[in-house]
Image (tube, coloured by chain):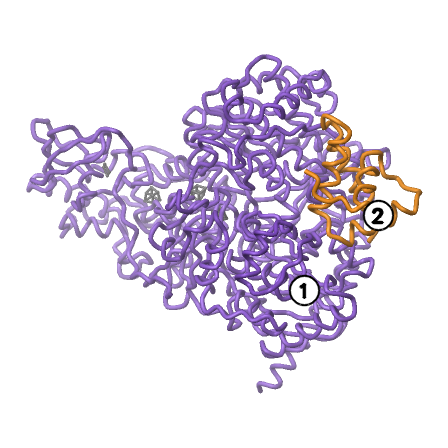
Amino acid sequence: MDVEKLVRMANQIAVNFQYDPSKKQAVDATLDHMSRFWSPPMREQIIVHFREGETELNEIASLAVSGLAEGKRHVI
Amino acid sequence: MSTVYKHYRRATDLGTPEVTSDKDVTLTIDGKQVTVPDGTTVLRAAALDGINIPKLCASDMLEPFGSCRLCLVEIQDRKGLPASCTTVVAEGMTVTTQSPRLADVRRNVMELYISDHPLDCLTCPTNGDCELQDMAGAVGLRDVRYGYEGSNHLDTEKDSSNPYFTFDPSKCIVCSRCVRACEEVQGTFALTIDGRGFESKVVASQNQPFLDSECVSCGACVQACPTATLTENALIEKGQPEHHVITTCAYCGVGCSFRAEMKGEELTRMVPNKDGHANHGHSCVKGRFAFGYATHKDRITTPMVRESIRDPWQEVSWDEAVGFAAEKLKEIQKKYGQGAIGGITSSRCTNEETYLVQKLVRAAFGNNNVDTCARVCHSPTGYGLKSTMGESAGTQAFDSVMKADVIMLIGANPTEAHPVFASQMKRRLREGAKLIVVDPRAIDMVRSPHVEADYFLGLLPGTNVALINAMAHAVLSEGLEDEAFVRARCEEVAYRNWREFILDDENSPESMESHTGVAAEKVRQAARLFAVAPNAAIYFGLGVSEHSQGSTMVMGIANLAMATGNLGREGVGVNPLRGQNNVQGSCDMGSFPHELPGYRHISDPSVRKLFEDEWNVELLSEPGYRIPNMFDAAVSGQFKGLYVQGEDVAQSDPDTQHVEKALSSLECMIVQDLFLNETAKFAHVFLPGSSFLEKNGTFTNAERRISPVRKVMEPMAGLEDWEATQALSNAMGYPMNYSHPSEIMDEIARLTPTFSGVSFKKLDRLGSIQWPCNEQAAEGTPTMHVDEFVRGKGLFRVTPFVATDERTTSKYPLLLTTGRILSQYNVGAQTRRTENLKWHDEDVLEIHPHDAEQRGIEAGDWVGLKSRAGETVLRAVITERVQPSVVYTTFHHPFSGANVVTTDNSDWATNCPEYKVTAVQAQKVTRFSDWQEHFEKFEKEQIDLLQQAQNSSEKVVS
Ligand code: SF4
Ligand code: SF4
Ligand code: SF4
Ligand code: FES
């Protein structure tokens, strides 16, 4: 899949959780959302992209994807 | 279970509408004691007891009028002969309905009517079903003393401009039932009685033909007319029906109940069912008249296959078609993996069919790649309502609106898209309820006869969240919240967080004004009106959900309703108006890739276990692809096979060129539909669908109401849709053996707590059921969240306004927003094959005079509409209905290519496309766009390939 689109989607999710009371909560909410609504190939692809380094992911999305990469899933 | 057939008879008419009262009144009618609610008329009281007083101007769909003087009665101790339709019962009243004196008066009345009425009963289309004829019989009219030579109206001309009904004024008795139906039932006020005395006659608008008048062809006047003056053309052509079956309209989410009035297997007419719980005897032009598509010559009734989309179609047997499809799908899975195929369920099909398609995907395909077209309309509604209140559904019954004091309509255009509910809403507004309209476009509800919005907040497309936050800010900052409700019913910490967020100055109406374009003071006034009302209700549509922040807006709406205590009783609530007939149902039935039926997440092992035990298969615990993800994966080569039931993604989904690219990359696409729709042009297998008249099942409307769909004719292609799915499943190697859809519903009930009390038998008994229907609510649940929210405590979610990426630039300086029109339905595959084309034969571009002038565009000019996704050409309509810098169109005709222009931007939570905001440029052009030229070529090629199949089969037959 077009990884740029996945990045855009991840960023969009993160921005919508940005006002959660703490950064951790925003990251968890983003990670949880991606686990619940993204199919595994989409998550795998964004993880690969994240591991490659260069990424347009915003801070919260980036932390969320890093959590996914560590195997974290439904955290809420 | 067999279809319930009843012999044809006209629906009972009790003369005046039902009244409800805590007090009962007992009176005596013709020596019999009768007890009725206080406020009931004598006419109705008698009818309820089986005593039929002659009447002509009265109908239980209309307020009493008292003009014909046929319903006169004698009442002890009262002078004269009062009209029973306008006389209300009183305790101890003694009424006589038949006496020589009454008979005389009634005969005189009838004599006058008949003297100016053609005596062609034997050749009249309503012969045998005419109230005037019945009354002549009932009063014993034997001779007419006035002669027919005097002046009369027998030569007046017919008006047959409306394609569905004829107005023959020579038969009119000027009872004004039609005029009152248009006012009271429909709320359009298109008819009046013009002139006085002998000269008086019924006219449409300014004495215009019906088609050119304001008439919206709802049919209420036709139904109300006691004579043959207003008659359905179908009845004139085909004659009287001989039996009828109760079924449900297959068009919009109002879910009107109808009597399908039949002659053998032929449908004569559809008449709205007075006992219908969603529509109470009303209808719109689509359900009432636009059913001709069901027998249209374009219907494909033989399964077809082909190796490539450039090959001619080959007609084959059902077995060959499903065998071919199953082989292909299995090959793909072997080559590309189990997850390389999927299915799309339809919001136009029944619950049972939808359930079966998702079962096929999960159990037979062995993945969760199933989604539904609700993805592209109301998926944010499901997400937003579930996360705040705990259930992905509207909170009220339609009838609840009759108790609302303030109605806030956001991003919905009910007079076009939910017409029967719009009529009910208008009725409530005429009774005095206040109206707030939030919409970028001045929809009809903003101002129409006898309805005017108290506040029209004409915001810029894409700023819904800014507006709802500003309203919430106004409520909280002015201390207008319902503290007691929030304390008792909602989670405290979440409320405090939300409160703090909303009260930030950033969310004030003053700060948000620059985003929304709506004056802060107006927002404050509207917010006050909403907050202080005893009952305030919110109704919303796709103008809320189809945005990059669709889900946020739904949560914003839920927050506002909770903060003002407007949930859990009649007259209030959060009410999504669903587009297609079974959007609610398709979502309920587990069509989303992450949810099993009843909105339970696929990752929940206990829920999975329930289904695994029943289905005898292991289920994957991870969500599958959503529709846009399927397309993206197809373009990148990971997704290769798709089964689409009753959907036309090639026309309805955004960014057409991307969709076309995705569909062209599939190795096997199976389309099941009535017609060779746009999507089918990319298919390898075509399974002919069955119309709603050809199958049994249920639809669930916007108020969670499950209503029966009943087979009135055999499926043209031999199989009902669920049978085709079952055959495909068996061919894939996963056995399914249902013998009737009622068995599928029984399975749904076994597996889904909110449906546990639902069965076809109960539906037959009750007529319809609003889920949840279970042990706690055996007959269903009209109002949800009464004592507590489904999730326990209501959850306020913080709703930051994030402007969409789709912004105007110097290259694309206008914002395009899209919508619907009354006479057409969705992609138009059905309504374009009916006479509804008379009202809307092409999609047009609405543009503000200022923007048009700047571009040298005049009315009727061809305008090229270009976005970063693509370009199409539409004809211009210049109107102030749209604001400057906003343009608007509809997507009912494929050639218009509205979705060539819309982009792949989508809601952050659900991927619901942002149909409502696209940055565009518009300019005058002289030729169609490249895409349109390509479309025409491709269309021609595909029609040729279809004809080749049909020609070769004709050869075989001959
Ligand atoms: S069809 Fe409906 S809108 Fe038209 S005149 Fe009759 S009642 Fe009015
Ligand atoms: S058209 Fe029919 S309903 Fe209307 S006034 Fe004439 S008879 Fe009555
Ligand atoms: S289209 Fe909607 S409003 Fe019209 S008859 Fe059908 S269900 Fe009713
Ligand atoms: S029915 Fe009562 S006056 Fe016409």
As drawn, B484 above or below B711: above
What residue is pinned by disc 2? A47
Q: Quadrant of the C terminus of chain A?
A: top right
As drawn, B457 above or below B443: above
Residue B323 occupies quadrant:
bottom right
Cβ of mark 1 under 8 A from ligand 3: no
Left or right side of A7 for B5: left
> Is residue A27 shown to the viewer in this render?
yes
Q: Nearer the viewer, residue B11 or B239?
A: B11
Q: Amino acid at mark 1?
A: Ala
In contact (CB < 8 Å): disc 1 and disc 2: no
For mark 1, give the secondary structure: helix
Q: Residue at x 25, y 35 (%)?
A: B67
Count of all numbered marks drawn on residues in the image: 2
For mark 2, give the secondary structure: helix
Left or right side of B296 for B82: left
Chain letter, colour orange: A
Left or right side of B15 for B823: right
Q: Amino acid at mark 2?
A: Ile
Residue B625 occupies quadrant:
bottom right
- Chain to which the residue tagged by mark 2 belongs: A
Q: Please provide percent x and percent y for residue B391.
A: 54, 40
CA gap between label 1 and label 2 equals 36 Å
Outermost top residue: B478
Chain letter, colour purple: B
- Chain to which the residue tagged by mark 1 belongs: B
Q: Please provide percent x and percent y for residue B415.
A: 52, 39
Q: Please provide percent x and percent y for residue B851.
A: 76, 32
Left or right side of B275 for B512: right
> Is residue B858 shown to the viewer in this render?
no
Q: Badge 1 local density, few (<14 within 10 Å), some, or many (20+)?
A: many
What residue is pinned by disc 1? B680
